Amino acid sequence: MADDLPVPPLLNGNLAFFFDLDGTLAEIKPHPDQVAIPPEVLSRLQQLADLNDGALALVSGRSMTELDSLSAPCRFPLAGVHGAERRDSSENVHLVTLPPELVETLRSDLTREMALMPGTELEAKGMAFALHYRQAPEFETRILELARTYVRHHPLLGLQPGKCVVEIKPKDISKGAAIAAFMDEAPFAGRQPVFIGDDLTDEAGFERVNRMGGTTIKVGKGETLAQWRLDTVRDVHLWLEELTSHQLQEKKHITERREGYESLSRSI
């Protein structure tokens, strides 16, 4: 879709919310350890989850351990490492793994190769590896070719480009597949999905949610499959604040109408 997408409306109805983290709920930083979700945003997320019967999940390239740490004291359903690990609302954990010998080969080889490119960083996630080059963009082409080489030689592996990062992960894992898995379970089942993300890694989620008849929101510039756009992380925070306030008001009106009908019924 084109760059001139409209701002998303304030949504009502039987909804299920899915949020990316970096570049969506939190500003992107030079190093992943510097990222934080503001406390007031976490409060709004918890409020939105409560208003929608718990149908809110974080869907990220980060591990679930990192997601729990960044979203504490809240505890949401999670999809980490693009869906290779997932925790549902009943606290059941679903994992996609790679053979240990393949993981060890990747760890050893990638550590050696990345050491030859100063300023790059290898992030090991257990069943996936992120090759970061934000601090050394001159190595982008070399890193992409390195990752493609391993994926070509190992049919169990897939490639996931992102913002100044490329990830090697289990094949056929995607945020779209993770969202679809959530949508088959309570409390998400039967609801209309809403997915908000900012990166190439989120496009699979946009594609799947569009097919489900849901709402998709891109954060930032660039071509996208999303239907709506918010320009910055700060705009996401403001939209989230307005959305929760809007849903609270709608819930209050519904409660007042119900109580009015019940009172009228008793008087009759």
Image: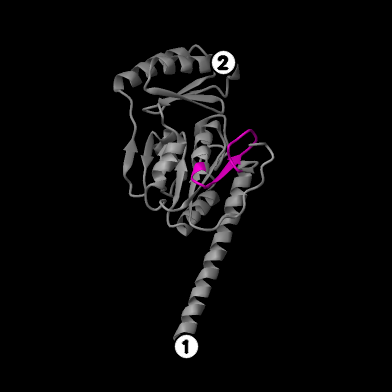
Give the mark nearer the N terminus: 2 vs 1: 2
Q: Position of residue 170 (x, y in %)?
A: 39, 27
Q: Is residue 260 above or below residue 21?
A: below
The residue positioned 55% from the left and 65% from the top of the image is 250
- Assign a secondary structure to mark 1: helix
Q: Position of residue 57 (x, y in %)?
A: 45, 46
The residue positioned 65% from the left and 35% from the top of the image is 221
First to last magenta residue range: 211-227
- Magenta stretch, main secondary structure, is loop
Q: Is residue 13 above or below residue 185?
A: below
Q: Position of residue 80 (x, y in %)?
A: 42, 36
Crowd around label 1: few <14 · some 14–19 · many ≥20 (10 Å): few
Tell me, for residue 197, which label it has, or none. Answer: none
The amino acid type of the residue labelled 2 equals Thr
The residue positioned 54% from the left and 63% from the top of the image is 248
Crowd around label 2: few <14 · some 14–19 · many ≥20 (10 Å): few
Tell me, for residue 141, which label it has, or none. Answer: 2
The residue positioned 50% from the left and 35% from the top of the image is 204
Relative placement, left or right, of 101 versus 195 is left
Relative placement, left or right, of 250 versus 65 is right
Q: Is residue 18 magenta?
A: no
Q: CA distance from mark 2 to mark 1?
A: 76 Å
Quick check: can you spot residue 187? Answer: yes
Quick check: can you spot residue 21? Answer: no
Label 2 vs label 1, nearer the camera: 1
- Check contact, mark 2 vs mark 1: CB within 8 A: no
Tell me, for residue 267, which label it has, or none. Answer: 1
- Assign a secondary structure to mark 2: helix
Q: Is residue 212 magenta?
A: yes
